[in-house]
C-alpha cells in the first residue's frame, strides 16, 4: 500500500510495488503499512492511532544506557526520565512545604520533618515501570508489533533492527515515522564532565540521595531539578552562564529564580565550569570561572548534574541512506507542515523534528493527526501556535502564547499593552508564606478589542490555571472577554480575570477608557 495526498491534503492508500519497499521486500523481511522508530509519547500515539484505524503497524524502540549506565523501558523521555518522575518528585517537595504549613492549621506534626529519598525513589520508579508495562499491553491490544531493536536505515523503505544479542532483522514499510526524541547533552570539552557527572537521564533513578548537588545550566530542566532537590531538604546550587529560561518571558524567569534563591537554592551567575575532579573521600571538586571578573573558584559536591541542553537522537539512524535531511546546526530533522521530511513517505515528529516545541503533548497530538492523515480520516495539521506549558519550579510558572519580548518584537512596543498584578494566594495567608513573587500578566494588542497574545502565571497550580485559559486564547480571546469572565472564588485563577492595571500607564482601562 502507498498513501497519496489527494484533495485537501488527504491521504488515500493504494497497492504498488516499491523496490526495496514493503511490496518489493527481500525474503525474510517483515513488511508493514507504517513503521514507527521510537517508543516515546509521539511515536506510540501515532502507532496506536494508525493501528486503531486498521493499518499494520510496528514500533521499533531501543534505549541506549546513559554514560552512568541508567536504562529504562518503553515510553520515552516523558514517562521514564522526564515529565512523570519530575512531577512526582516536585510533588514530594511540595508536600514537605505543606507539612511545614500544617501546624498553622492546627495539625500536630512531629519535628524534625525528615525525608527518605530511597523510599520516594522506589515508589516513583515502581510507578514508571507500571507505565512501561501499560504501554506494552496497549500495543499488544491494538495488534502493534513491538521490537526492542536499535534501528538504522538501509534505504528509503527499509530499516535494519539490531537486538541486544546482535541479531539483525530487516523491516520494510510504505511509510516510516521517526520519533526518536533527544538525550541530554554532556559538555565533553570540560574535564571530568562525562566521567563524574550525571544528567536528567539519571537523577530520577538514583537509589540513594544525590546529597549536595551542583546543577549546571539555566534551562527549565536545571531549575526544576534544583527546585525539588531544595524542597526535599538537600543543598542545591545552580551554575548559570547567562540568563535563566532563555526561551521564556524574562520578567517571569527573574521572578522564578528570585523565589528559588529566597527559599534556599544557591545561584552562581555568570559562571562556567572548567573541570570536575574526584577527591579521595569520594566528593567531587568543581573548578569554575566567573566570566565578569575572570576569577577562578572551587567547590565540593556529592553530585554534579548537567542540564545544558539536549541533542536529537539522529546520529545512529543512517539518515543519509534514506536521503533524509537534517539541520546542519541542530542535527534535527527538517520537516514541513505535514511533518514530512525531505523524503515524502518518511516523517518526523516530536523533539527530533526541527522547529517543534520539545513538549510531550505536542508530540502526541502531532502523532495522532499524522496517523489520521495517513489513513485518510482527516486533513487536519498540527497547530504549533499558542501551545501552553508549565515550568514545575517550586513556585510554578505557566504560560501560553507570546512572551512580552516576543510580542514587542513582532508587533512593536507602541502596539502592545500588558495588564499585570501581584497577588497573594489564600493558602499563603494563614502560614504567612512569602507571596512576593506570585504574579500574573496578560500581554495584549493595544488597540480594541485587545487580542490576548500571551498569558503568564506564577503561583500554585500554574499548570491547571494555564490549561483553562489556553482554550480561550486558542479561540482568539480578547482582553475584554477575559475581563467579562466570572472568576471562581476564592482561587488563584480568579486573579487573572481581575487584571485591571496597565503596566505601561498604571491606569485601569475599564475606568479611564485608555
Image: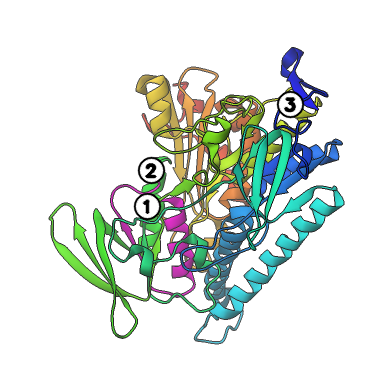
Residue for badge 1: 218
Q: Residue furthest top?
A: 7
- For marks 1 and 2, the one nearer the N-term is 1
Towards the viewer: 44 or 358: 44
| Alpha carbon distance from label 1 to label 3 | 48 Å
**Please, what secondary structure does the residue beneath circle 2 have?**
loop
Local packing at callout 3 (Cα closer than 10 Å; few below 14, some 14-19, many 20+) is some
User: What label does residue 246 carry, if any?
Assistant: 2
In this view, the mark in front (3 or 2): 3
Local packing at callout 2 (Cα closer than 10 Å; few below 14, some 14-19, many 20+) is few
Horizontal and vertical percent for residue 339? 62, 29
User: What label does residue 18 carry, if any?
Assistant: 3
- The answer to whether marks 1 and 3 mark residues whose Cβ atoms lie closer than 8 Å is no
Q: Which range is magenta?
A: 217-245
- Taking the image as shown, residue 220 lies to the left or right of residue 270, namely right
Towards the viewer: 27 or 17: 27
- The answer to whether marks 1 and 2 mark residues whose Cβ atoms lie closer than 8 Å is yes
Residue 229 vertical placement versus 183 (above, below): below
User: What label does residue 461 carry, if any?
Assistant: none
Residue 101 vertical placement versus 193 (above, below): below
- Taking the image as shown, residue 7 lies to the left or right of residue 253, namely right
Amino acid at each position: 500500500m502507498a498513501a497519496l495526498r489527494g484533495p485537501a491534503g488527504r491521504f488515500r492508500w493504494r497497492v504498488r510495488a516499491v523496490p526495496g519497499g514493503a511490496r518489493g521486500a527481500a525474503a525474510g523481511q517483515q513488511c508493514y503499512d507504517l513503521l514507527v522508530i521510537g517508543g516515546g509519547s509521539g511515536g506510540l500515539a501515532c502507532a496506536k492511532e494508525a493501528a486503531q484505524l486498521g493499518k499494520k503497524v510496528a514500533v521499533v524502540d531501543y534505549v541506549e544506557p546513559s554514560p552512568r549506565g541508567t536504562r529504562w523501558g518503553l515510553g520515552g523521555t516523558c514517562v521514564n526520565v522526564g515529565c512523570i518522575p519530575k512531577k512526582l518528585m516536585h510533588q514530594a517537595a511540595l508536600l514537605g512545604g505543606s507539612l511545614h504549613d500544617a501546624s498553622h492549621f492546627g495539625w500536630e506534626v512531629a519535628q524534625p520533618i525528615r525525608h527518605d529519598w530511597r523510599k520516594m525513589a522506589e515508589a516513583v520508579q515502581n510507578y514508571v515501570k507500571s507505565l512501561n508495562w501499560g504501554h506494552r499491553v496497549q500495543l499488544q491490544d491494538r495488534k502493534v508489533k513491538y521490537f526492542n531493536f536499535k534501528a538504522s536505515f538501509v534505504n528509503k523503505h527499509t530499516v535494519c533492527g539490531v537486538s541486544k544479542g546482535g541479531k539483525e532483522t530487516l523491516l520494510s514499510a510504505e511509510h516510516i515515522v521517526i520519533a526518536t526524541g533527544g538525550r541530554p547533552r554532556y559538555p565533553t570539552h570540560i574535564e571530568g564532565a562525562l566521567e563524574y557527572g550525571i544528567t536528567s537521564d539519571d537523577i530520577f533513578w538514583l537509589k540513594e540521595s544525590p546529597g549536595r548537588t551542583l546543577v549546571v545550566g539555566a534551562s527549565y530542566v536545571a531549575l526544576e531539578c534544583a527546585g525539588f532537590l531544595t524542597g526535599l531538604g538537600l543543598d542545591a546550587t545552580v551554575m548559570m552562564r547567562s540568563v535563566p529560561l532563555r526561551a521564556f518571558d524574562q520578567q517571569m524567569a527573574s521572578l522564578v529564580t528570585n523565589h528559588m534563591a529566597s527559599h534556599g537554592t544557591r545561584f552562581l551567575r555568570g559562571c562556567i565550569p572548567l573541570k570536575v575532579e574526584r577527591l579521595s573521600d569520594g566528593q567531587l571538586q568543581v573548578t569554575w570561572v566567573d566570566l565578569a571578573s575572570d576569577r577562578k573558584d572551587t567547590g565540593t559536591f556529592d553530585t554534579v548534574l548537567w542540564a545544558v541542553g539536549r541533542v536529537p537522537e539522529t546520529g545512529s539512524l543512517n539518515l543519509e541512506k534514506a536521503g533524509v535531511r537534517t539541520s546542519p546546526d541542530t542535527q534535527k530533522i527538517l520537516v514541513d507542515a505535514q511533518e514530512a521530511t525531505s523524503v515524502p513517505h518518511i516523517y518526523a515528529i516530536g523533539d527530533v523534528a526541527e522547529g517543534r516545541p520539545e513538549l510531550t503533548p505536542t508530540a502526541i497530538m502531532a502523532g495522532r493527526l499524522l496517523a489520521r492523515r495517513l489513513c485518510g480520516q482527516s486533513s487536519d495539521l498540527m497547530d504549533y501556535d499558542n501551545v501552553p506549558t508549565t515550568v514545575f519550579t517550586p513556585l510554578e510558572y505557566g504560560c501560553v502564547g507570546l512572551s512580552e519580548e516576543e510580542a514587542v518584537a513582532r508587533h512593536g512596543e507602541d502596539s502592545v499593552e500588558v495588564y499585570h498584578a501581584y497577588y497573594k494566594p489564600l493558602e499563603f495567608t494563614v502560614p504567612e508564606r512569602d507571596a512576593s513573587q506570585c504574579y500574573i500578566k496578560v500581554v495584549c494588542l493595544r488597540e480594541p478589542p485587545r487580542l490576548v497574545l500571551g498569558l503568564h502565571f506564577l503561583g500554585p497550580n500554574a499548570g491547571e490555571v494555564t490549561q483553562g485559559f489556553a482554550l480561550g486564547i486558542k479561540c482568539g480571546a480578547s482582553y475584554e472577554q477575559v475581563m467579562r469572565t466570572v472568576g471562581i472564588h476564592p482561587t488563584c485563577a480568579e486573579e487573572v480575570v481581575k487584571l485591571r492595571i496597565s503596566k505601561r500607564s498604571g491606569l485601569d482601562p475599564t475606568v479611564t477608557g485608555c
